[in-house]
Image: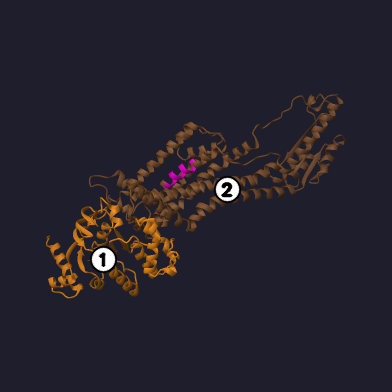
Amino acid sequence: MSQPVVVQGLTKVFFDDARGEIRAVDGVDFSCQAGEIFGLLGANGAGKTTTLRMIATVLAPTAGTALVMGHDVQREAEQARRALGFYSATTALYPRLTARETLEFFARINGVPAAAVRARVDELVARFDLGEYADTRVDKLSTGMKQKVSIARTLAHDPPVLVFDEPTVGLDVLNALEMQRTIRQLRDEGKAILFSTHIMSEAERLCDRIAIIHRGRIHACDTLAALREATGQHYLEDIFVYHVERAEEQGEAGL
Amino acid sequence: MRPVRRLFEGLWTIYRRELRAALREKGIVVNSIVIPLVLYPFLLWAVSTGIAFVMGQTEGFTSRVAVIGAGPLHRPFLRMLETNHKVEVREHLPLATALAALRAGELDAVVEILPAAEGGVVPGEFALRVTVDEAKERSRTARERLDRASERYRSEWLAREARARGVTAADWQGFSIRSRNVSSAREMGQFLLGLLLPMLFVIMVAVGCFYPAVDATAGERERNTWETTMTLAVPRFAVVAAKYLSVATFGGVAGILNVAAMTASMGMIFAPLFAEGGEEVQFRIPLAAVPVLLLGALLLALFVAAGMMIFASFARTFKEGQSMVTPFYLLILLPVMFLQVPGLEFSLALSFVPVVNVTMMVREALSGSFHWPQIGVTVGVSAALVLACLGLAARILAFEDVVMGSFGGSLGMFVKTRLLARRGRGAAGEGAR
């Protein structure tokens, strides 16, 4: 069976009236298997979010391809969207719906058969312990509860691919740990998970493979053990700095 | 599942979510439902109550009237005035003093009984000259009271003189003018509805669309739910169409609710007032006008919703959206002012003018007349306008920086930098799906 996510030569160029052409993502290649957490590690503005937005079909690639469960994100955007769940700090919940209405809406819109919607919603309410708050409007929920509803809505249609773009940004320690625990569970259930972060410890703890992205390019992509071996550095922070410095040197040398 | 079915199911699901969410927003409920239903009927009631109160106050005044030159011959006229307890007659004042008192507001009217002008053929012939100060409400009221009394006195005088000559008063008068109104009570009501409702109808459709349009575009960005919506597993067309239809629904509903509420309240408030004046007026929308009214609401709402969403789609916050939509809102209200021009008819030429054509169509329908060629042109022009707006919307949505909210300008800037000046490099930010 083909890999759930296959990205080849993915490129995104923005035009800015003041700055001209900006290559936010520049020929990125990677893949993600079922039951794997694939991490994109990079500083702010490195191109993580743009890459994940292209995979989630929010942005159109300038060049290259991305396949989600075999569906090209440009030509078969709708099918690709149905095969993935996208979670990020900028994908907020509809504040005027209740938690249950939110889950029903996402289940329906993402293709869960009408007859199965209620059962699926009940399942998610039970899984994320939302029972007490299921009929409360989202804007009245605490941050922790909103986070649970957000993850639940990402899973509403039980997609094989999940994209988490900096999911712990803005969360307190306990909620961040809860988020990490959930992501691990989902990996264990066989989901292919794309995960972006700029927090080294998070990537170290969670990711099965890590891609270090800098100025729109992936400079290393492997398991943590292999990255350690290749760089001779133990801590991910040092590994990251090693690759970024090399990338900067290569950039200066015009390579 | 077939793609077309998926498309419509997706559209329906998003449409219902948009309506549900909008109905839970106080601002939208107030502007799109409560105001059309309550505000203008309330204003109508408040104004008519205010007028009735002022009229009541004026009616309560005693009119101070100086009568000069009555003499013994016209004592009956004085008695007639005195039987009205709201008229206080003052006699024996010199004319100059009476006129000075009138100007000073100490008198409300001066009545002079004058001998007939030279050449009078009937003995005892006379004329009444009533002098009032039209700038004073009390004085105008005094004139109305005097008019009634003097008309009665004149009729009695004519009848008496006619009897003395062995003829009837009508024969004696020789030439009289009588008017008749062939309009039925219902037709009069329809005419009055047609005068007032179309203007409010346009205003209410615009008000009804305003908040939902901003909420569905700029509001989504402000709440950070825009990207969530962009990742829904339906074609982007379904998302945009669902939002558009929900905004148009609010506009159409606001227009229809207002027409219904105004018709009901005019019936309750105006009909009794007309009845007091001896006229019977029925405020009812003719059944045949209902389809035209619904068509008008649909056409206007579709156009206004499209226009407002286009303007609001460049905003990143609700406030920004409001200020971007306001010029369009004022622009569509501008032609409506011309509807008050007397004698304006629903001509073929007028049926080519957007907004005015729909309003005229509604006005004519409320009055019970239907000009089918003009209605046909109106439908065609409105449909073309809506299609043009949707075409522009499709062009705008092709630019992902606009879709994602990173384009830092308004519609004007977009047209200038993206549509008119596309030079070699291709349009920046183009490529959203």
**With B253 as the anchor, is A181 left or right in this view?**
left
Query: Which chain is brown in the picture?
Result: B
Q: Position of residue B158 (x, y in %)?
A: 81, 29
User: Looking at the image, which residue is at 76% across and 38% down?
Assistant: B148
Q: Let me know if residue B302 is in the magenta part.
A: yes
Q: Position of residue A93 (x, y in %)?
A: 38, 62
**Which sits in the foreground, A194 or A107?**
A107
Give the answer, above or below, for where B96 lies relative to B171. below
> Residue A200's image quarter?
bottom left
**Which sits in the foreground, B22 or B162?**
B22
Asked if the residues shown at circle 1 and circle 2 are in contact, with their CB atoms under 8 angstroms apart, the answer is no
Q: Position of residue B190 (x, y in %)?
A: 60, 38
User: What residue range appears in magenta?
Assistant: B295-305
User: Disc 2 designates what residue?
Assistant: B261
| Residue B316 seen by the camera | no
Amino acid type, callout 2: Ala
Amino acid type, callout 1: Gly
> Dot 2, how many residues are within 10 Å of its Cα: few (below 14), some (14-19), or many (20+)?
some
Query: Which chain is orange in the picture?
Result: A
> Residue B171's image quarter?
top right
**Magenta segment main secondary structure:** helix
Which label was assigned to residue A190? Answer: 1
Which is more foreground, mark 1 or mark 2? Answer: 1
**With B85 as the anchor, is B37 left or right in this view?**
left
- The secondary structure type at the circle numbered 1 is loop
User: Looking at the image, which residue is at 35% across and 43% down?
Assistant: B391
User: Disc 1 versus disc 2: distance between alpha carbons?
Assistant: 59 Å
| Residue B393 seen by the camera | yes
Q: Let me know if residue A98 is in the magenta part.
A: no
